[in-house]
Image (spheres, helix red, strand yellow):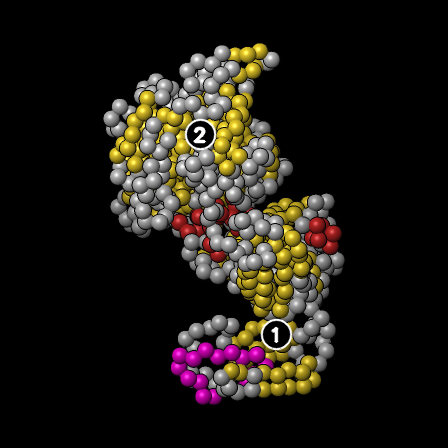
Amino acid sequence: NNDGILDIIIGDLEGGLAVLNATDGSVIKMTRGIPQNAPTHYQPCIYDIDQDGNLEMLMADPHDTTSDDLVIWDLVKWQIDARIYIGKCFYGPQVADVTGDGIMEIIACNYKSILIIDNTYRIIDGIVGLSGDIIQEGQPRNIDGISMLAGTLNYAVVQDIDGDDYNELIVSTQSGYIYAFDTPARTPNPRPRTEIQFYSEYRLGAAEYVQPQGGQAPVIYSPNPPNNAKNVPLSLSKLEFSITDYQKDLMNITVITNPNIGSIILENKGNGRYTVNISNLRYATTYTWTITATDGIHSTSITYTFTTQDISPWWNTSWQYRKAITIDHTKINADLTEFPVLIDITDSDIKNKAQTNGQDIVFTDGNGLKLDHEIEQYDSNTGQLVAWVKVPFLSSTTDPRIYVYYGNPNAENQQNPAAVWDSNFIMVQHLEEAFTSRLDSTANNNYGATLNGVSKISGKIGAADQFDGIDDYINFENSPTLNPSSAVTVEIWMKLSSTSNYINLVNKGTYNQFYLRAGPSEGYTYWYVRFDDGSSRAIEGNIGWKWNTWHYLVATVDTQAGSMKVYLDGVEKISGTFAAGKTLMATTNPVRVSDTTRMIKGAVDELRISNVARSAAWIQACYNNQRDPTQFYTLGGEETIPEFPVVYAPSPPNNAINISPSITELSFNITDYQSDPMNYTVTTYPDIGSASGTNVQSGKISLKVTGLQYFTTYVWT
C-alpha cells in the first residue's frame, strides 16, 4: 500500500490473495474472485517485473481447480497485468537475470519445461542450453518443445555455482535429477540468497541482492540485567548482551564498567550473545556498563545501568546464611494481605548448611520481621524445601522481597503452621500424609481419614491422594467451623481420569449443603449451595478442564453479594446470582472428598475451605504461585552476615513522594554485626542539613533539617 512499511501478502489455494497489516493482522486488501482464478498453491514471487513502480505478484500452480496460466497481479492497482498460458507448474515462478541484459526475467518451470519470460510478458525462445540432447546416465535423451526434462520440475535457482562470475540456472526434478545451465548473465555482487524463501533476505523469489533491514552499524540489544534494573542481587556473576551486524561483518567489541566490576576486549567476533564476568558487587550501588562495537567502518556504543539491592538488616546473627526471595509483582493483579506464598526450591546450600530436619529454616520480611511458615516437605538429601509462608503484604506494583535464613545447628523448630493461614481459612489439607489420617493445618483441627484404600502419588505440590474410582474417599467429620453462614470458598487441585460417572470432588451435607462436582463429560462442572430457608442455587457448564491434567478448581459463594462463581486455573468461567442476604444451611454431616457413590477416579491435592469468598485477584495469585513457583519468584544467591556497617530503615523511605516540607528530621538505623564502633556522615542536596558522628554504636541516628521547598527532590547520602 506504499506506506513504506512491509506488509504480509498471502495467496489463496483456491485462487485469490490478501494483503494484511503486519502489526495487527487486519485486512488491507483482499480478493477471492480473480477472473479465471489465480493459482497460489505454494509461495508466489513478489517483484516489480514490468518496472512500473508497483510490486507484482507472480502466480502459477498445478491445483485442479485453478487455471494453468501464469498470472501477474499488480498489488497497487489491484488488477491483472498479464495472463500467460504455460501449463501446470508444481511451484510458482522465480525472477532472475539469465539473458545478461541486466533486466530481470520470469523463470517458470512447468511439469516438463523451463520457460523464460521477459518483462513485456513474451516467452523468449532459443536460450543457450535449453535445446538439443541432454546426456542422462551416459545416454542421450531427446528433447521435445523448448526443453522436455525428465520428471516433474521444481522451482529454478539462479546462482554462480561454478565460480566463473556468470549465473547458472539450476532446476531439480522430483525424479531425483539436477540440471544446471550456463547463462550469459553476470553474477550480482553481493550475491543473492539461493533458496526460494530467502532469495533476497525478505523479498520472496527474486534472485538479486537487497540491502538487509537494519543499518550499517552493529546493533546492541537484550542486555541482562535490563537497563535501569533495580534490586539486582549481589549474586549476579555476569553481564550479558546480544549484538548483530546485518552485513555480517566481523566486529571488535569492548565492555567497561563503572565502578569497575569487570571488562572484556574481543576482536573479530561475529553476531551472537556475549557475556562479561563480574565480581565484588556492593549493596545499594548503581553501576554503568558501556558496550562499544565496531566493524572497522561503523561503530555503536551504548551504556546501560543497574542498581543492586538495598541491604536488609540481619534478623539474627545466630543464623549464618540467608537468601533473598524476590516475588514478581506482575503475577499479582491487586495488592493482597496475609497471603500464604508457596516456596518450592531445591538448593544445595540449604542441603549442606541447614539442619537435616529443616527446623532452623526461618523466613523474614525485608525489615527483619520474622514470618510465620509451615514446612510441608523437606528433603535433606536433595535440599528440596516445600513451605508455606504468610506474607503480610504483596504489592501488585513493586516486587516484594522476603528472606529464607538457615545455618543454625542449635536452633529449635521455627515453624508456626496454624498462624500461616488467616482466620478465614476453616480447613487446609495438604494431603501429604503417608498414613490414613489427614491433618488440618489451621487451628480448627478439622482432621479427616481416608477409607477403602486411598493411595499416595507425587502430586501437584508434594504428595497427593489417588482414588481408584471404586469406593475410596476421605471423610472429615462435622465441626462448627465447617458450617460457614455467609460465604464459602472451596479450592482444590485435581487430575481426573476419564469416567462415565459424576465425580464428587468436595461436598458438605450429603449433597445438600454445598457441593462441587465434575463430569461426567470432560470439562463439565457443577457448583451447588443450599440456604437455610430451604432454597438452593446451582451453576454449571463446561469450563474446559481436561482429563489426566492437573487443574486448579475454585468455587465461591457470597450471600451478601448474592453471587456464586467457578474459576479454573485462576480464571472465572461461570457465575450466577441469587437474592442477597440469605444464610447458608448448616448441617451435622461431614465433608467428603469422593464418596461411596460419584467417586473420584484420579488424584487431588491441596484442599482448602474458607468462610469468605476469595477475590479474583487472590485466586489468580494462588494459581500463579502454585502452578509454577519458579516463575512466581526468584531465589537470590547466598548471603552471609555483613562485615561492614549496615544502613537501613530510612525515614522518609527511599523514593518517597508527597513529603510535607514541614518535616524537621531525617532518621535511619545503622548496625555493625561485629559490634565495632562506627563513624558516619550525612549530607543533603539541595542542602537542608548535615550531620556526622564518631565511635557510635548500633542504633537510630537522627538529623535536623530546615528550609524544605515544595515540588523539590532531595538526595541524602
Disc 2 packing (10 Å; few <14; some 14–19; many ≥20): many
- Helix, strand or loop under label 2: strand
Q: Mark 1 or 2, which is nearer the eye?
A: 1
Tell me the quarter of the image containing the C terminus: bottom right
Q: Residue 503 — which label?
A: 2
Disc 1 packing (10 Å; few <14; some 14–19; many ≥20): some
Q: Tag 2: residue type?
A: Ile
- The correct choice, above or below, for 159 with respect to 233 in the image is above
* Residue at the (63%, 61%) spot, across then down: 254
Residue 116, position as x, y percentages in the image: 41, 27
Name the foreground residue: 221 vs 537.
Answer: 221
Which range of residues does the magenta coloring cover? 701-717
Tell me the quarter of the image containing the N terminus: top left
Residue 495, position as x, y percentages in the image: 50, 33
* Residue at the (29%, 30%) spot, across then down: 82
- Helix, strand or loop under label 1: strand
- The correct choice, above or below, for 475 with respect to 428 in the image is above
Name the foreground residue: 93 vs 351.
Answer: 93
Q: Tag 1: residue type?
A: Val
Name the foreground residue: 705 vs 125.
Answer: 125
Residue 630, position as x, y percentages in the image: 57, 48
- The correct choice, above or below, for 653 with respect to 156 in the image is below
Q: Residue 647 — which label?
A: 1
